Image (cartoon, rainbow, N blue to C red):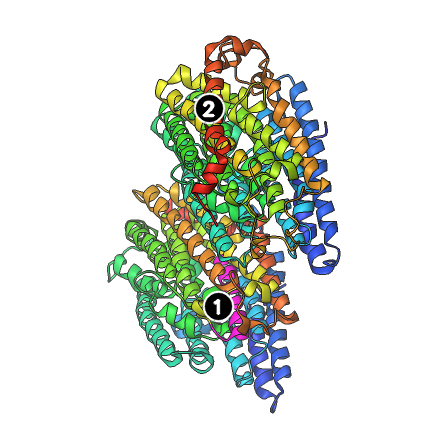
Amino acid sequence: MPTQVPWLIFLLPFFSFLFIGLVLRPFLSKYPRVGGYLTIGTVGISCALSLWVLGAVIAAPDHMLLVDDIQWAVVGNLNIHIGVLVDALTAVMVVVVTFVSLMVQIYSQGYMKGDPGYLRYYAFMSLFTACMLGLVLANNILFMFVFWEGVGLGSYLLIGFWFHKPSAANAAKKAFIVTRLGDFGFLAAILILYAQTGTFDTGTLYKLVAAGTLAGTTLTWVAIGIFSGAAGKSAQFPLHVWLPDAMEGPTPVSALIHAATMVAAGVFLVARFYPLFSHSTEAMTVVAVIGAFTAIFAASIGLVMNDIKRVLAYSTISQLGFMMLGLGVGSVAIGIFHLFTHAFLKALLFLGSGSVNHGTGTFDMRLMGGLRKAMPWTYITFVIGALSLAGIWPLAGFWSKDEILVSAFTNNPVLFGLAIITVFMTAFYMFRAIFMTFHGEYRGGAEPEHGTHGDSHSQGPHESPAVMVVPLVVLAVLAVCIGWINVTGFFSQLMGSGEAEAVSFVQGFFGVLTHPLPLISLIVALLGILLAYAMYCASVRKRDRKNDII
Amino acid sequence: MNLNLLSWIIFLPVIGIVIIALLPKPGQKTVKWIALSATLASFLVSIAVFLMFNRSEAAIGQMQFEEKLLWIPAINSYYHLGVDGLSLPLVILMTFLGVISVLVSWKVELRPKQFFIWVLMLESSILGVFCSLDLILFFLFWELELIPMFFLISIWGSGRKEYAAYKYLIYTLVGSAFMLAGILSVYFITHTFDITALRGIQIGTSFIPLTVLFFLLMVGFAIKLPVFPLHTWLPDAHTNAPTAASVILAGALLKMGGYGMIRLCVSMLPQVALQYAPVMCTLAVIGVIYGAAVTLRQTDLKRLIAYSSVSHMGYVLLGIFALNQVSLTGASLQMFSHGVITGLLFAMVGLVYDKTHTRDLNNLSGLARQMPIIVVVFSIAGLASLGLPGTAGFVAEFITFAGSFTSVAVAGMKIFTLIAVIGIVVTSGYILWMLQRVFYGYPLDKYNGVKDADAVEMISTFAVVAVIMLVGIYPAILTNVIYMGIEPIAKLIGM
């Protein structure tokens, strides 16, 4: 494989951003569609190249590709190179980012149709995707920080996309400032690393940690600093406050932010510097405890939200807590595997909520109901996503969640207890959302002036166009079967953790069901679904009468 | 071959002044075109100097493009010019902002002839400060700058312009008085005004303690930079000055302070600098945090940017008195990057004010719809100011932090640095808040008729954006040059 390929993965979306911003928008704004096609095309090629890179990494004996560096600046003994690091973690991440981004861009063709900011939208989306890819590919903590901030900028621009709404402008500002608060720790960690080691290079840092040169309190503070940055972007308690407000952006943006880019960045960062964390017990404990607490805390808020996007937002925070827990008590493979499956199914759920919004003009679940007849495709795919997120065998979410539960169980009973309660809550709030949205009777949708789209909703809810449904179906298929790649421990081996056996008590597609632990989590999840059914479906008429909502 | 390029750079604006002055009743357009040509010519010559600047190892620490003529034989004073890696970026900065400030004044209609004469004289005098290698010449240019700035603020300013002009005048004169005492002391001790000879000079006996000498010079520079608590002239002067004067004031004039500190205080008295570095770093950190905190409270756009300068100049002071090679490089780069970024911010505020006739954040809202180009440029300037990677602001701040964090010159430098880093979080707060108040939210009907940037405004602001991005993406273009000047100074301190 030519070594330029990893560079191209990043450069193509970046080129798309520059071309739209510098050529299309000033001179060819009469043809906004070109911007959409260009973005889809470049991200599509990036996605194909990412798969190629992933294939090459799988084939490579040590799951690593070597790519040459470029010199950027020399200031005295401050010598900075630019380069890419292609290992299994990077390869998996680029595939996730480009694929989810591609699905979101295609979907946006329908969702953003006719928006006056269409070109601006695609320019920002390209920038956002490019920065995330740059972050994932960089082999140098300083450049990771550069793209890290770029991701922050992208989210600022996209959350505040409808800037004429004060709520959107506020949410964008809040997201940027809260994540910047976390970045203070990240920057401090970089400065400590530079002062201690004089290098920014990731590979060199790994070696220094392995050799024991970088150890003790310093290492703990570095790790905690990095985690503080990660907690900002990945919305860990107490820096989670920006994420629910970030719903002010267009829904495909939420899907991208929640699945593959912004929030995944934090988890990725911890995974990238995992060798640093794993040499500090204190840092690992902090990650695990904050993760577990965030998981149960956010899930408990998700139980009572009435806005479908906010349910999903708190669900994301909770699942990110799960990933951090997986990293804290387990390994890179465990945390990233959950990121991997969650990316597809959360993108699916968000795009599904966008489809519901497209059909009804509202996000308020109290104004929905009975949509399963009007929007069958959205309904089926949403249910698949919800089942997968709830961790029902044999869907994708089950496999990754099971590994985290196993690691928590072997590590600390309290963390396991928190996690299993979270599983229950997750199943409950997802199915509460489904029963409120898709079952029962239609409760009227939005008042005309609440509609975000110009088109009329007077004829009642309707299914979304094919350009929006197709990405849903593709993602639904993945939400079912993407978890199977680790049934035999393939994914764990790729991630290079020698602990592939410790991941699960028992292996195999049906084999897992022979151990009590997966059965317990399944039963807990099913109980959550049943409770939701009892409260929001079986007695829906009674409930409707009680809470006269309009 | 000696083309006297530095003299050309300094005196091309003066030639512009002479032409404007001699023309009987020139039209407005003529005056503007002459001013533009003069500043542009000076800028092009400075670019030529930048390209011809010798970056080889052998030239490290050497003054280049030197010119030396005996001027006042009685006191051994020379007309002595020269640039090194420290001053060259600042010369480029000034000539560049000179062009920009003429372009942003394209719509000045009040006494344009005088206005542009003062602007050109201001440029000349600041360039003179950066190029002088003789203390008397240096002081002459330093004082000369006061006159045009005083008239620019008091005639073409707004609000309490006379108050601001006098405040500026008094502050600077007080600083200059101390500085003159310092310069004369230097002469009586060393019997030379030659700045190149003073670098790393071993002072044997002195009639006053070296600490006193250090602070005599330091006070003048500290007022100019400005260092907390000597900064109070700055918000008034910036706020009430016309746009062009604000651009030059924030962009280039403040840097005379930082330049002087490195060139004289640190180079001549490195041991005293080392001794008092903890004090200066404390003031720097207070400036960063206090400046940023006060900025958060501002509702006048110009005053907001002015206070942000107090905060950003704190990074320069921190970089200088962390006293190692990386931090000094960072400080020099921060001077350049703050110059272009804040220059652009003031230019953008000027544009918004021209069009809406208000700078009060409470009266502005939703302008993004009405000014789609201005919002983009203003946002880029703001993001650069808050240190977003990819812009000059990030590179300069990061190099400064990396240098000061690793500095062993001062105990507790790590703590100072970390406190200063908090400043960038607060900065993102006030910058984004400002952008939101001005551009986002509901568009106001009263601004429906306002125009977006016209061709001249686009050219001037896009040019600055290009420089900000260039330095942000490829900082080596400047750091390689700065290295030439900083390396020998860092060696003096032995760090």
Q: Amino acid at mark 1?
A: Leu
Seen as rendered, the residue at the extreme bottom is: B24
Using the image, determine if residue B287 lies above or below residue A279. below
Using the image, determine if residue A125 lies above or below residue B82. above
Q: Position of residue A534 (x, y in %)?
A: 47, 28
Q: Nearer the viewer, residue A463 or B126?
A: A463
Mark 1 Cα shell of 10 Å, populated few (<14), some (14-19), many (≥20): many
Using the image, determine if residue B454 lies above or below residue B21. above
In terms of secondary structure, where does tag 1 sit?
A: loop
Q: Is residue A179 left or right of residue A362?
A: left
Residue B342 in view of the camera:
yes
Q: Position of residue B441 (x, y in %)?
A: 51, 61
Residue B325 in view of the camera:
no
Residues under numbered marks 2 and 1 in contact, where contact means CB atoms less than 8 Å apart: no
Q: Which mark is residue B322?
A: none
Q: How many marks?
A: 2
Q: Pointer 2 indicates a residue of which chain? A: A
Q: Which residues are magenta?
A: B336-358
Q: Pointer 1 indicates a residue of which chain? A: B
In terms of secondary structure, where does tag 2 sit?
A: helix
Q: Position of residue B373 (x, y in %)?
A: 61, 63
Distance in Å between CA atoms under marks 2 and 1: 48 Å
Q: Nearer the viewer, residue A464 or B238?
A: A464
Q: Which mark is residue A326?
A: 2
Q: Nearer the viewer, residue B449 or B204?
A: B449
Q: Amino acid at mark 2?
A: Gly
Decide whether the magenta segment is chiefly helix, strand or loop: helix
Name the residue carrying label 1. Answer: B364
Judge whether residue B66 is colored magenta: no
* On-image quarter of the N terminus of chain B: bottom right
